[in-house]
Image (cartoon, helix red, strand yellow):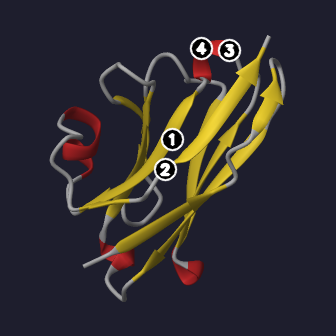
Amino acid sequence: QVQLVESGGRWVQAGGSLRLSCVASGDTFSSYATGWIRQVSGKEREFVAAINWSGFSTDYADSVKGRFTISRDNAKNTVYLQMSSLKPEDTAVYYCAADPSMVKITTNHNDLDAWGQGTLVTVSS
């Protein structure tokens, strides 16, 4: 079982940048696809970005393409989400999630193997 801990969320002004980190425990992390899912209070979870186990394949929601970049360092058991040109509508709790299937992360992110506790990103206009 993989356990995930996110960090890096904070308040930032619109147009600014932020990098989120997700550190995993467990020796099978390198075999998992990993992704970022966000949620605004009272709304459904929204897929943001995903990366496969090797890091060679990525996918993004249309709303963040060209602004966000997901990457991973398997030697450090860490996944990153570099966010730039942030907008107020990016305000949300950002969750790191892992699953053997990258397709599940992008399409059925309510049924994934592991979740972090979330980190709050607030973008002020």
Q: Marks 4 and 3, Cα distance to the nearest angstrom? A: 4 Å
Q: Which of the two labelled residues, at mark 2 and mark 1, occupies the earlier sequence position?
A: 1
Q: Which of the two labelled residues, at mark 3 and mark 2, occupies the earlier sequence position?
A: 3
Pointers 4 and 3 in contact (CB under 8 A)? yes
Quarter-of-image position of residue 1? bottom left
Pointers 2 and 1 in contact (CB under 8 A)? yes
- Label 4 crowding class (10 Å Cα cut-off): few <14, some 14-19, many 20+? few
Residue at 55% x, 23% y: name it.
Answer: 64
Residue at mark 4: 89
Report x, y in % for residue 121.
64, 36
Residue most extreme to the bottom: 27
Residue at mark 3: 88
Q: Marks 3 and 2, Cα distance to the nearest angstrom? A: 18 Å
Disc 2 residue type (three-letter): Gly
SS type, badge 1: strand
Q: Nearer the viewer, residue 58 or 2?
A: 2
- Label 2 crowding class (10 Å Cα cut-off): few <14, some 14-19, many 20+? many
Q: Which of the two labelled residues, at mark 1 and mark 3, occupies the earlier sequence position?
A: 3
SS type, badge 4: helix
Disc 1 residue type (three-letter): Tyr
Report x, y in % for residue 99.
25, 60
Residue most extreme to the top: 125
Q: Marks 2 and 1, Cα distance to the nearest angstrom? A: 5 Å
Report x, y in % for residue 41.
43, 24
Residue at mark 1: 94
